[in-house]
């Protein structure tokens, strides 16, 4: 119940294309869903986050879509660029538990 | 200025040794964390401290001992290092009380045990 399942494990997209990464969870108590971006040799950096009271959140080229009934959420990267090549992690958290449960990560490569 | 910093960045040591990793945050956050990222990039929480109090202690061998001397610092001491301890260790911080859930990560310490 504490797992967050992330797919795909790796993704190759052409420059200008849309990258889509999906996550699914079981625990309906989760109430915060962030996405992190990690470049090689660096720490994960918060990209965008959503709470379950909204179905979509957009920041620049990055959009989170959230489907509460299906217990799924996804990250869409529009107009993908080679500089977006990184590993992306979804996560879920429960208020007051201090704890993030991370997905297994998706290695994105955007071809120039 | 670096928000969450860790030292050292790289640590190479032999099995059986004892080593420490240090973390400092200048964000004024009340909660700090240690994560382990294995070779498959999987991120798993190890410990969390809120206002110097241990609040999360996952199933981690007791060779690992965290210490938080104050809200801005969290250290990780590892005794009797084993090959399986080789990983990247990340420190993170967040403001939980009256704040958001956002966790900010340090640059990581790559530990290699030979």
Image (cartoon, coloured by chain):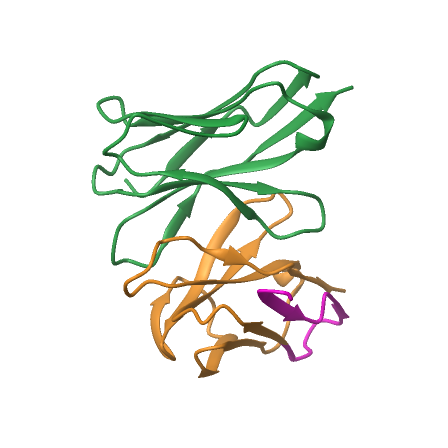
Chain colours: A green, B orange
Q: Quadrant of the N terminus of chain A?
A: top left
Residue B51, position as x, y percentages in the image: 36, 77
Q: In the image shown, does B9 or B86 lie closer to the viewer? A: B9
Say left or right for B74 vs B13: left
> Is residue B12 one of those drawn in magenta?
yes
Question: In terms of depth relative to the viewer, which is nearer, A57 or A98?
Answer: A57
Residue shown at the point (56%, 74%) measured from the top left: B24
Asked whether, in this view, residue A86 is left or right of residue A89, the answer is right
**Image quadrant where residue B49 sits:** bottom left
**Count of number-bearing discs:** 0
Asked if A24 appears above or below A43 in the picture, the reply is above
Front-most of residues B42 and B98: B98
Q: Name the quarter where the C terminus of chain A is drawn.
A: top right
**Residue B20 visible in the current orientation:** yes
Image vertical order of residue A38 relative to residue A99, above or below:
above
Q: Report x, y in % for residue A44.
A: 57, 48
Q: Is residue B47 left or right of residue A93?
A: right
Q: Position of residue B2 (x, y in %)?
A: 63, 65
Q: Hey, which residue is sitting farthest bottom in the picture?
A: B69
| Residue A104 visible at all | no
Q: Residue at x 66, y 31 (%)?
A: A84
The quarter of the displayed image where residue A23 is located? top left
Which residue in the rendered view is the most extreme toward the front? A60
Counting from the top left corner in percent of width and height, residue B40 is at: 61, 42
> Taking A71 as reference, is A89 left or right?
right
Which residue sits at x=32%, y=43%? A32
Is B114 drawn above or below residue B16 in the view shown?
Answer: above
> What's the magenta region?
B1-20
Magenta region includes residue A50: no
A99 lies above or below A4 = below
């Amino acid at each position: 119940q504490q797992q967050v399942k992330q797919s795909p494990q790796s993704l190759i997209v052409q420059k200008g294309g849309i990258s889509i990464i999906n996550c699914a969870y079981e625990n309906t108590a989760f109430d915060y869903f962030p996405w992190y971006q990690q470049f090689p040799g660096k720490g994960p950096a918060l990209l965008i986050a959503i709470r379950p009271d909204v179905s979509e959140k957009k920041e620049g080229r990055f959009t989170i879509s959230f489907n509460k009934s299906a217990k799924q959420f996804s990250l869409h990267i529009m107009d993908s660029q080679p500089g977006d090549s990184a590993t992306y992690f979804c996560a879920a958290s429960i208020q007051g538990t201090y704890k993030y449960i991370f997905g297994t990560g998706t290695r994105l490569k955007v071809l120039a | 200025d670096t928000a969450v910093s860790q030292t050292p960045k790289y640590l190479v040591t032999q099995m059986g040794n004892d080593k420490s990793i240090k973390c400092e945050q200048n964000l004024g956050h009340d909660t700090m964390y240690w994560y382990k990222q294995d070779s498959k990039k999987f991120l798993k929480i190890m410990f969390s401290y809120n206002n110097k109090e241990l609040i999360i202690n996952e199933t981690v061998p007791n060779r690992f001992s965290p210490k938080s001397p104050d809200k801005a610092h969290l250290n990780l001491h590892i005794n009797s290092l084993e090959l399986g301890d080789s990983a990247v260790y990340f420190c993170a911080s967040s403001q939980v009380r009256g704040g958001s859930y956002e966790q900010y990560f340090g640059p990581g310490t790559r530990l290699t045990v030979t």
